[in-house]
Amino acid sequence: MPCRHHPCHPHRRRVVARCFALAVLLLVVPAAGRSAEQPFPSSAGTLAVRTVASGLEHPWGLAFLPDGRLLITERPGRLRLVTQQGELSPPLPGVPEVWASGQGGLLDIALDRDFAHNATLYVCFAERDGRGGRTALARARLIDGAAPKLDQLKVIFRQQGPLSSGLHYGCRIAQGPDGHLFLALGDHFAFRDEAQNLGNHLGKLVRITPDGTVPSDNPFVGHRDAMPEIWSYGHRNVQSLAFNPFSGALWEIEHGPRGGDEVNIIGKGKNYGWPVIGFGIDYSGAKIHEATAKPGMEQPIKVWVPSIAPSGMAFYQGTLIPGWRGSLFTGALAAQLLVRLTLDGDRVTGEERLLASLGERIRDVREGPDGALWLLTDAQNGRLLRVAPAGR
């Protein structure tokens, strides 16, 4: 009688048959987490959410390359190339060493406006300095090909001020039409009063040139006891930063404490009030702010109470979902959804909450070259999602 491992044994034949059937099934049925679509209702009709790639460890920022591939950062300190078919590269060499502690790590990424010609990109990250961390911005070139990597990495900005224990780095990047870079810097949580101190970079938006120098027309250049990189101040923990393509203005979204997440339109040299004014309370329930408004301090154009913990944002310019053109989208971490804000110029006129039943922390949102919305989910097994009308 043949042994159980003999290829002609009945048990062995059943195992082989089951394996063959499973292999055929995997070839025929879309792999879960890669191409299966989930339907969700919306004001634009049924949306289809497709998982393009998974297995990303706390992905944080994404940027589309000219050929449609994506660069995605993972908070522990990895940078990946991802095709629109979901093919995931090994980690790219050449990224900066990061302090992956708490909310820190490798965070935002942005391509230079002239990337097609100079292959230059920018990464924002938490950098260890002694017993704490600070936000830093580096410039590098992407060497593409069979073994892609970052080359000529150079840190062009380091945040000055009390160090973070792992919280409130900010770290979103936006590049202006003139090529100057804007970088969001958090208040490091334990040092919120420093957001009003122009002598350091905590709770500020800064503006620098692509080589890290200070533009001569920055608002505090030549002011004694003020850091010349500062563009605006009085911010808590900015998590979204983008230029409105319809107006040209710089918009940001920042976290409040318990309540008081804000959407702001940023003006040169303006004070956005944290922690003197605001709409939330401390995590203990204690009062933080003197008031909700004060002369000389700017008012947000939108406030969330309770907080949703907004994240990356994108202004929608596409035609794939024509009824949503001109809307502002932001992910939400605590609320675990995608938010669409309707706008009338500089006014927020409405809010639609999408993908709530997905149950995912949405870390970043971008409009893709195909007109779809592309999202990152913040999880140990994070995903890249494509959101589009069903059948598109």
Image: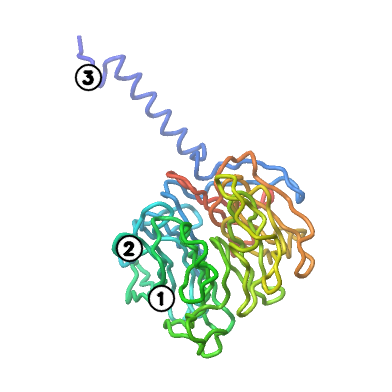
Residue 11, numbered label: none
- Mark 2 burial class by Cα count in 10 Å: few <14, some 14-19, many 20+: many
Give the CA distance from mark 2 to mark 3: 59 Å
Instruction: Pinpoint residue 186: horizontal percent, then vertical percent.
Output: 50, 63
Instruction: Pinpoint residue 6: horizontal percent, then vertical percent.
Output: 22, 19
Q: Mark 2 and 3 residues: CB-CB less than 8 Å, in contact?
A: no
For the N terminus, the image quarter is: top left
Secondary structure type for disc 1: strand
Instruction: Pinpoint residue 301: horizontal percent, then vertical percent.
Output: 72, 64
Q: Is residue 281 depicted above or below 151 in this figure?
A: above
Residue assigned mark 3:
6
Viewer-side label of 1, 3: 1
Which badge, 1 or 3, is on the more N-terminal residue?
3
Residue assigned mark 2:
128
Q: Which amino acid is tagged 2? A: Arg
Give the CA distance from mark 1 to mark 3: 66 Å
Residue 157, numbered label: 1
Front in this rendered view, residue 141 or 310: 310
Within the image, what quadrant is residue 242 found in?
bottom right
Q: Residue at x 71, y 73 (%)?
A: 246
Q: Which amino acid is tagged 1? A: Phe
Front in this rendered view, residue 200 or 375: 200
Q: Residue at x 47, y 45 (%)?
A: 379
Which badge, 2 or 1, is on the more N-terminal residue?
2
Secondary structure type for disc 3: loop
Q: Residue furthest top?
A: 1
Q: Which amino acid is tagged 3? A: His
Q: Residue at x 62, y 73 (%)?
A: 271
Instruction: Pinpoint residue 115: horizontal percent, then vertical percent.
Output: 48, 77
- Mark 3 burial class by Cα count in 10 Å: few <14, some 14-19, many 20+: few
Mark yes or no: residue 326 visible: yes
